[in-house]
Amino acid sequence: MHIAIDATPLLVRSAGVKNYLYHWITHLRREAGRDSIRTFPRLGLLGPLDHNGSVAGRFRTATGLGALALSNYMPVPVLDWLTGDADVFHASVLVHHPPRRVRLTATIHDLTAWTMPELHPAANRRAESSFASLARAADRLIAVSQCTKDDAVRVLRLSEDKITVIHSGIADAFFDPPREAIESVRARYKLSRSFVLFVGTIEPRKNVDLLIAAFNALPQTIGAEHEMVVAGPMGWAAPETRARLQSVRYLGYVAEEDLAPLTAAATVFVYPSLYEGFGFPVAQAMAAAVPVITSNVSSLPEIGGEGVLLVDPRSENELRDALARLLTTPDLRAAVARRGRARAEQFRWPACAARSWEFFRSL
C-alpha cells in the first residue's frame, strides 16, 4: 500500500498544520516504512522544522509550489500524473483538485474559519471553503480531536461514520528538556525573572489582548515579581494588539529548537484561545511540566483534561484570578504541573502514527 501525503504546507509559513505534518510524516515513515509513505512534492529526509520558512531546499521548494500552482489552476490532471501508483492521497487545505483515481483522505484541524469567520482574513475563509468541498468528497477523514469531529459534523454536515478521531502528538523535545538548554535560553532572551508565558501566532483568535489586560490587572505585589512573555510570529493582529504588546516582553518568532526549553523555563503557561482544534502549545507546556491555564471552550478541556486550570476566555477577572492563584501558590503549581505531565503522555507521536497507519489500512 502506498500513501501520498500532500506536504506543500511544509514549504510555506505555517504554524499548527506544519507542526502536525512534519512530525506526522516523520513518524508514519517509521511506522509503515519509507516506501509506503510518499509526499507531494517528493521530499526525502525533512530538514529542521522552521515555521517561518520551508523545510526543503530552494529548488525543491520552488518546484513543489510550482507543481501545486499548476494542479490548482491548470485544466489538466497534474496530481494524477505526479502521485503515480499511490493507493491513497491525503490532501491539505492548499490542494484544490486532488487526484481522481485514488482513495481521498484529509485531516480536519479546526473549523474556526466557519465558527468564527470574523476573526479571519478573507483569504483564510476562501481556503477553508475550498477545503470543505474536498472534505465532503473524501472517502475518510481524520479529526485531531472529538471537538473538531463534532464541529465538522454539525457545521459541514459530514457523516460521523467517515471521521476518525486521532489526537495529534507532542514532539519528544518538550518532555524533560535538558537543564543546560533551559538556562541557555534564559540567558539568550535575558529572562532573569519568573515569567508567565504565552506561545502562539498573534491573531484575534488567540485572545492576546485579554491576556495582557488580565496580567496588568494583577495586584502590584504579584505583578512586580513576574514578567509577561509573549512568543510567536505576528499574524493578522489589529493595530491595538500590536500596541499592547509593547507593555510586555514580546519575543516575536522563536526558533523551534528554543521553544521547548523556553516553555520549560516558564513559571506558568497561559493560553486563553477562543477556539482550538487541538492546541499544540497547551499540550507542549503540559509535557514540559509547566502548570497551564487555558480556556474552557472548544477542544482545550478535551486535551487538557485534569492537567490544566480552565477559565472563561471572555472573562478578564477569571483569568486574572487564576493567574494570581497559581503565581502565589507553589503547591498548586506543582500539583497542576504533575497532572499535566501525566496527561501529556497520552499524546505521543508514535501512538498517533500507529493509529493513522491503521486508519489507512482500513481503507
Image (spheres, helix red, strand yellow):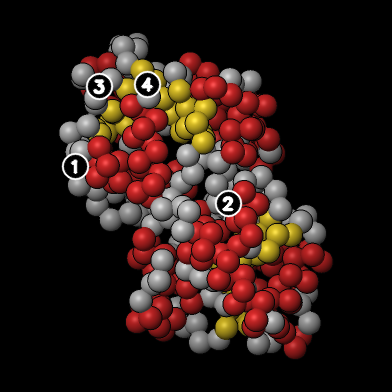
* Circle 2: element type: helix
The residue at 24%/52% (across/down) is 47
Residue beneath label 2, please? 303
Residue 241, visible in the rendered structure: no
Q: Which mark is residue 86?
A: 3
Q: Is residue 69 left or right of residue 332?
A: left
Q: Is residue 46 left or right of residue 232?
A: left
Tell me which label, 1 or 4, sits earlier in the chain: 1
* Circle 4: element type: loop
Q: How many discs mark residues in the rendered view? A: 4
* Circle 3: element type: loop
Tell me which label, 4 or 2, sits earlier in the chain: 2
Residue beneath label 4, please? 363
Residue beneath label 1, please? 44
- Discs 4, 3 touching: Cβ within 8 Å: no
The N terminus: image quadrant:
top left
Label 1 – label 3 distance at C-alpha? 17 Å
Instruction: List x then y, in percent, for residue 109.
Output: 52, 38
Q: Which residue type carries mark 1? A: Gly
- Discs 4, 2 touching: Cβ within 8 Å: no
Q: Which residue type carries mark 4? A: Leu
The residue at 20%/38% (across/down) is 33
- Discs 1, 2 touching: Cβ within 8 Å: no
Label 1 – label 2 distance at C-alpha? 32 Å
